[in-house]
Image (cartoon, helix red, strand yellow):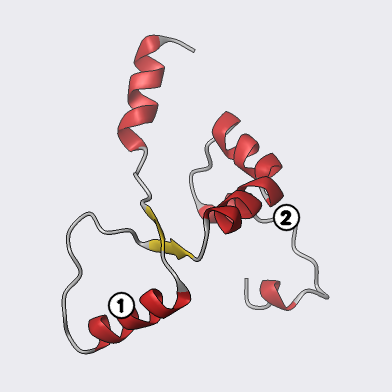
Amino acid sequence: MRLDAVTARNQTMKVLRLGIASIVAFKARTIAIAKGMRTRLGEPKLWFSSAQSIGKLIDDNWPLLQEIRRHPPQSITELLPEPDAACPIYRGR
């Protein structure tokens, strides 16, 4: 890959911040947000209960993550398999 292609690709990437918190801490945070307390800038958007749960998610989806890295999709719908009429997720698509 040429350097200018790498630079262009990096400019379109977004940072996804992950957080690890106990279930109790996550519930307290959720209640605080519901009460109108604002979250801080740069705070994680995706929360897990342990590092092991993050590892399992990545491990279970490794082939998909590699495909996304090799061939970045233009939209999330490009990642969906071909529609299957028996599958409820495809109704109305």
Image location of residue 7, percent across then percent down:
33, 21
* C-alpha separation, residue under disc 2 versus residue under disc 1: 36 Å
From the top left corner, tell me how far across and down residue 16 is, in percent: 38, 50
Residue at the spot x=45%, y=70% of the render?
Answer: 22
Residue found at x 46% / y 76%: 23
Give the position of the C terminus as an image quadrant: bottom right
Relative to the observer, which residue lies in front, 80 or 42?
42
Q: Is residue 34 above or below residue 53?
A: below
The residue tagged with tag 1: helix, strand or loop? helix
Q: Amino acid at mark 1?
A: Arg
Q: Is residue 63 left or right of residue 76?
A: right
Helix or strand or loop: what does disc 2 sit on?
loop
Q: Quadrant of residue 12?
A: top left
Residue 82, which numbered label? Answer: none
Q: Residue at x 52, y 37 (%)?
A: 72
Depth-wise, is mark 2 or mark 1 nearer the camera?
1
Q: Which residue is mark 1?
A: 29
In this view, the residue farthest toward the top is 2
The amino acid sitting under disc 2 is Pro
Q: Would residue 4 appear left or right of 55 to someone viewing this image? A: left
Q: From what the image shows, is residue 14 above or below residue 8?
A: below
- The vertical placement of 8 against 59, above or below, is above
Occupied quadrant, residue 86: bottom right
x and y percent of residue 53 in the render? 59, 58
Outermost residue, bottom side: 35
Q: Residues within 10 Å of mark 2 (few under 14, many from 20)?
A: few
Residue 81 badge: 2
Nearest to the observer: residue 32 or residue 85: 32
